[in-house]
Image (spheres, grey):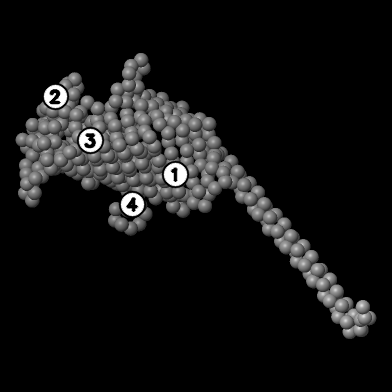
Amino acid sequence: MAPRSRSEIKNVRRTDQRRKAENRNDSWDEARSQRRVLWFGGSIALIVIALAGAWFFVASQVNKLIERELEGLNRPDQTVTCAGQDIVGFPFRMGLKCDGIQFASRRNKVSVEAGTLRTAAQVYAPRHQIVELQSPVRITSPQTIPTTIDWDSARSSIRIDSNNALQRIILEINEISASTSLPDAPARALIKLGRLFSVAEPYAIQGDGAPTDLRLFVQADSIVPSGISLPPLSFQGTLALDEGTVLLSNPEGWLDMVSSLRNPIRLEGVTVQSGNTIIELSGQLSLSSEGLLNGTLRLAGQGLEEGLQALQAGIDPRATELKQTVDTIVPTILALALPDPDNPKIRNAPPITIRDGQISLGLLPMGTIAPINMPGR
């Protein structure tokens, strides 16, 4: 091999230097990339640890708040219990779980027991709560026979605004049944419903200003009452309450003030349908200071004769008291109901009047509504 010239030797040295520089740069870039990965991974780990710590801290505070609320509800005359109380939903949700809930009023001798209660809210949307309750619910009271209510699913959606004021409550229950639960006796079905849907929301009657009134819409499908042979019923209607938002925070306060309101309870768009019969009910009601109901209800029906005769024929003969009442009322309604001038298919029944709890259809007495308990009276 011929000896290299000086220029070739210089080129070789430059090439070696360039390779060494490139190797140093590659090592630096690799080390820098590794440091970036470590910093990034460390930052993510710190964020996760901080978020987890924040979740459990907030959960502990929420748990203490619920305990204080329950302590406030528990008084000498009533108890409210959340068995197995726990805050669940980590990491993206937060909610309350009770293995069972129970309410007992010693003053009214009423007891209510229910299954597992779960609430859930996304951590980024805490003002929207989803509430689920498992059946059954058992109710005992001196005024009624012990009752058990079952369902397939029951879910509620609750929204509040930035001022912690209610915006809307939506309730949906599917495949509901109610039956008696007497000791040492077989259960007897009382009623079945395919679906119950309800929306409660505050509103301002004038359309502006802060909401003061409360509107409750109820829809029920495939209603099958026990002891009556009829095509399944469907129901929908709205109950509007003047100054009803007080009920959300102070039910006793609303009952105390309601006697000063002229017509605080309004029925709007109430419709009952069975087969080809459609009955519409509307009216306004009020409460006296003694808790007695007063008001006038108006009833109109399409296919009224067919529906009422089917009702009369469909009552179980063993329900003698109910059958006697229906046998008296149905002929009276059909005799007094007049065709509507604008639509002969619709017949308008005489107004149903309620005076101090006494119900009458025209001049015919129909029964009595017990006084509503007015606290403090």
Looking at the rendered structure, the secondary structure element under dot 4 is: strand
Residue 290 visible in the displayed image: no
Q: Earlier in the sequence, mark 1 or mark 4?
A: 1
Residue at the image position 87 percent from the left and 78 percent from the top: 12
Q: CA distance from mark 1 to mark 3?
A: 30 Å
Say which amino acid is labelled 3.
Pro
Q: Residues within 10 Å of mark 1 (few under 14, many from 20)?
A: some
Q: Are marks 4 and 3 in contact (CB under 8 Å)?
A: no
Q: Are marks 1 and 3 in contact (CB under 8 Å)?
A: no
Asked whether 40 or 121 is in front, the reply is: 40
Q: Residue furthest top?
A: 184
Looking at the rendered structure, the secondary structure element under dot 2 is: helix
Q: CA distance from mark 1 to mark 2?
A: 46 Å
- 61 above or below 319? below
Q: Earlier in the sequence, mark 4 or mark 2?
A: 4
Say which amino acid is labelled 4.
Tyr
Q: Which residue is mark 1?
A: 130
**Which mark is in front, 2 or 3?**
3
Q: Which residue is mark 4?
A: 203
Q: CA distance from mark 4 to mark 3?
A: 33 Å
Q: Which label sits on residue 324?
A: 2
Looking at the rendered structure, the secondary structure element under dot 3 is: loop
Quarter of the image where the N terminus is located = bottom right
**Which mark is in front, 1 or 2?**
1
Q: Which residue is mark 3?
A: 232
Q: Classify residue 329 as left or right of residue 3.
A: left
Residue at the image position 18 percent from the left and 24 percent from the top: 316
